[in-house]
Image (cartoon, rainbow, N blue to C red):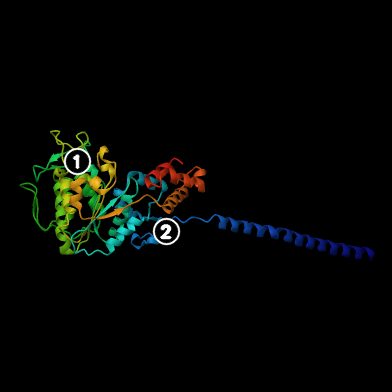
Amino acid sequence: MAASIRQKLSSVASRTNSLLRKSVTSIEHTPCVCSCYSTAAKRLEQEPRTAFRTNETDPRKHTIDHVGLYYSVPDEEMAVLKTGVHPWHLRMMKSFNESCMMVRKPALELKGYLDKLNLKHPVPRFLLYGRRGSGKTMTMQHTIQCCHKNGWIIVHVPWAGQWVRGWYKEVAVSTYKPDRYDLPADSAEWLNHFRAQNQGKLTGLKTTSEYIWTKREKAEAGTSFDEIINFGLSRLKFSSDCVGVLLKELREQAELKGLKVLVAVDSVNAFYVQWNQLNALKNIEKKKLQPGEISLVHNFKKMLNPDWTHGVAICAVSEEANDEDRRENFTPVYLLGQEGFEALDPFVPIFVPEYTEKEALSNINYFIDRNWIQNAHGKTDEGKKELMFVSNRNPFNLAKICAQS
C-alpha cells in the first residue's frame, strides 16, 4: 500500500516538473523574439530605401512628382527608340537586362509645350542645349515616346553628324540636281529607320503627285508610302530621292489629312557648320562638300522651315558635331554659327542641365540595384558623395565612373 502511494506521488512530481520546465522555456524565449522584431524595425527606420523607380510607364502621365525616377520602357516601344539612343546607353540596358529611362524636368517642360500647341500655326521649333553628356538625347527620346503613343508620325535623325563627316562612304552625284550629292547607303538606312519607327502609321498614305525616276520608271500619283520606301531600298541610286519624296508629301499632306508630324534632329548644328578639309565629306574629285550640297541635309532643312503646319520640330545641338577647334562653348549661338542661328530663329531654347542631387542619387541607387557598382565603398553615403563630386553630376561622366566602381 505504501509503495503504491509513493509511485503515485513520484508520477505527480515528475509531471509537475515537466510543466514547470516548459513554462520557463517559453518565458526565456519570448523576450528574444520581441528583441529581434524590435531590432529589425529600428534598422528599417534608420535605413529607409531610397525611391528611384516609378510604376508609371506611360510618359504622357509623368508629372513633376516623377522627376528623378526611372521608368521601364516596354520592348515594343523600345524598338522605336533604340536607334536614337547612344550606343553606350544601349549596352548598359543590355547589361541590366531591362530598358529604363529617367524622367527629367526638361522633358516635362517640352511635353507641356506640346500639350498646349495649336498645330494650325506654322511649325514651332524647340532647341535642346546643354553640356556634353547632360542628357539631351534622352530628353528627346522621352518626347519621341510621348508622340509615338499619341499616334504622331516620327521623322527622326538620330545623329546628323553622320551625314557630313568624311568617313569612307559612297558619294554620288544627285539624279535630281547635278549640283547636289547623294549618300545612297545613309539614305537607305534612314528609310529603314523611318519605316520601323512608324510601323502601322503609314497605311493609307499615298503620294499626291507623279515622280519620274528614269525614262521607264516612275511612281504614279497614288503610290503608297511603303512602295516608295521599297523602291528606295531596292534601287539605292534613288534612295535619296525617295527620302525627298516622303518628306515633301508629309509636309503637303499634314494639314490636308490632319496628320501630326514630329521632326526630331539630334546634333542639328551639323547641317550648318562646315568641317575642315581633313574631316569633311568629299566627292569623287576630292572636293570638300558643304552641308547644303548634300541631298539629305537639303531635304531635312526644309522640314525645319516654318512654312507648313501640323508639325513640330525638336532639335538638339551638340559639341561633337563641330570641329575640335569649335567646341569651347555649348550655347546655340556658338555651335550653330550665324547661318544656323538665323535659319532656326525664332526657336524656344530648352536647357538640359547636369543631374540635380536627387537625380544623381537616384542614378547611383539604380546602378547599385543592378549590381553595376561592385565596390562596397561606392554603396555608402560617403562613396555616393564622392561619385557625385568626381563626375560633377554629369550623367555621362557618372555612368563611366560607376562602371569602374
The tag on residue 345 is none
Q: Which residue is located at x 44 percent, y 55 percent?
A: 52
Q: Depth check: give the residue in front, 112 or 154.
A: 112
Q: Is mark 2 on a helix, strand or loop?
A: loop
Question: How many neighbours does mark 1 have within 10 angstroms: few (below 14), some (14-19), or many (20 or more)?
Answer: many
Q: Can you tell which quarter of the image residue 290 is in?
A: top left
Q: In this view, does 385 lie to the left or right of 271?
A: right
Q: Position of residue 16 (x, y in %)?
A: 82, 63
Q: Depth check: give the residue in front, 217 or 70.
A: 70
Question: How many neighbours does mark 2 have within 10 angstroms: few (below 14), some (14-19), or many (20 or more)?
Answer: some
Q: Where is residue 39 in the image (x, y as percent from the top left)?
A: 62, 56
Task: Tell me the residue that label 2 is attached to.
Answer: 54
Q: Where is residue 347 in the image (x, y as percent from the top left)?
A: 23, 55
Amino acid of disc 1: Gln
In the image, residue 28 sits, relative to residue 274, either above or below, namely below
Amino acid of disc 2: Thr
Task: Tell me the residue that label 1 is attached to.
Answer: 274
Q: Is mark 1 on a helix, strand or loop?
A: loop
In the image, residue 66 sits, relative to residue 368, either above or below, namely below
Comparing labels 1 and 2, the label whose residue is closer to the camera: 1
Q: Depth check: give the residue in front, 180 or 218.
A: 180
